[in-house]
Image (cartoon, rainbow, N blue to C red):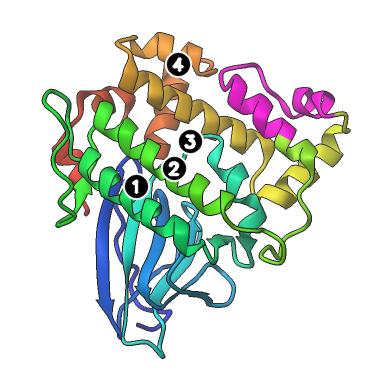
């Protein structure tokens, strides 16, 4: 598929969607504006390649690629290989996850964790099987059996939270079992950026500003803003906004609080501002998200 081809559609922003894949030699996906949500690709067999706005990066068994939302990306079966297989998951990350991946940043705005040890791969595979089953659970009786056939779409509630937990396990297993030295092309990680991320994650709804965060990590506001953007690819306030929306999503899933209290607890100035920001991020307003309108959530898959 040439770079000028029409974009391959992606799931709606609020969706958590997972599936196994096994693709032939001519397989390729390209999205000039990226996907509405993050995409994780785990290679279990064969060989593939991924890219952001930079060069192609090889993917072999035991490699994990993570492509952030709304950034140009493409992926394909390696031209020299006959097939490529593994798992893909579209999801919205929890606030702490980008920091775990930072040391695995590659040119072009993608993350690649390469060479997950063979001894760890079986557990990663088990996590994907649980993720696929849990994503189909709407509560009530026990989650469905671990049948990897088909596409799993998480609904709001316990199934979605369990699926997110499985993604978290995969990320921890992959990043924790590999050495980051030599993988990252980005600037060396500055612990003050990690400290700022921890402050945001600990209190997403807090009155964070560039000045307040800079003061807490002992940097000037201008130096902090430049350093944070250089190392994360987004501004401090974009990180705060993402953390607030993630916190609001969890409150909508796990509580029966009205939209107003959810907005206030997540640091938004008003329910109107919150609803507008939530719709921009997840594709539907908070009330529709909580109602679990599966028809709207599955549109465009």
Q: CA distance from mark 3 to mark 4?
A: 18 Å
Q: Which mark is residue 263?
A: 4
Residue span colored magenta: 195-217
Q: Is residue 149 left or right of residue 254?
A: left
Q: CA distance from mark 2 to mark 4?
A: 29 Å
| Residue 247 in the image: above or below residue 257 | below
Q: Earlier in the sequence, mark 3 or mark 2?
A: 3
Residue 300, how many percent across, how many down? 22, 53
Q: Which mark is residue 94?
A: 3
Q: Which mark is residue 169?
A: 2
Q: Earlier in the sequence, mark 2 or mark 1?
A: 1
What residue is disc 1 on?
127
Q: Earlier in the sequence, mark 3 or mark 1?
A: 3
| Residue 227 in the image: above or below residue 268 | below
Tag 4's secondary structure? helix
Asked if the magenta segment contains residue 200, the reply would be yes
Q: CA distance from mark 3 to mark 1?
A: 17 Å
Asked if the magenta segment contains residue 130, the reply would be no
Residue 5, how many percent across, how many down? 35, 78
């Amino acid at each position: 598929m040439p770079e000028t081809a029409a974009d391959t559609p992606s799931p709606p922003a609020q969706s958590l969607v997972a599936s196994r894949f096994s693709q032939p030699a001519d397989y390729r996906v390209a999205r000039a504006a990226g996907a509405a949500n993050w995409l994780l690709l785990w290679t279990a067999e064969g060989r593939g390649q991924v890219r952001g706005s930079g060069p192609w990066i090889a993917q072999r068994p035991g490699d994990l690629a993570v492509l952030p939302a709304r950034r140009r990306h493409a992926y394909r079966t390696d031209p020299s290989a006959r097939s490529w297989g593994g798992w893909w998951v579209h999801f919205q990350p929890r606030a702490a996850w980008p920091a775990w991946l930072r040391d695995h940043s590659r040119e072009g705005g993608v993350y690649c964790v390469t060479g997950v040890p063979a001894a760890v791969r079986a557990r990663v595979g088990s996590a994907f099987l649980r993720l696929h089953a849990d994503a189909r659970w709407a509560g009530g009786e026990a989650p469905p059996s671990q049948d990897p056939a088909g596409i799993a779409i998480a609904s709001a509630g316990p199934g979605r939270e369990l699926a997110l937990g499985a993604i978290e396990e995969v990320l921890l297993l992959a990043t924790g079992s590999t050495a980051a030295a030599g993988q990252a092309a980005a600037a060396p990680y500055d612990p003050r950026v990690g400290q700022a991320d921890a402050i945001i994650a600990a209190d997403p709804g807090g009155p964070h500003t560039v000045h307040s965060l800079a003061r807490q990590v002992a940097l000037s506001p201008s130096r902090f803003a430049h350093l944070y953007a250089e190392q994360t690819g987004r501004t401090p306030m974009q990180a705060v906004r993402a953390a607030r929306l993630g916190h609001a999503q969890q409150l909508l899933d796990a509580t029966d609080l009205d939209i107003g209290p959810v907005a206030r607890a997540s640091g938004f100035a008003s329910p109107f501002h919150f609803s507008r920001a939530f719709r921009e991020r997840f594709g539907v307003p908070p009330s529709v998200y909580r109602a679990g309108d599966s028809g709207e959530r599955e549109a465009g898959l």
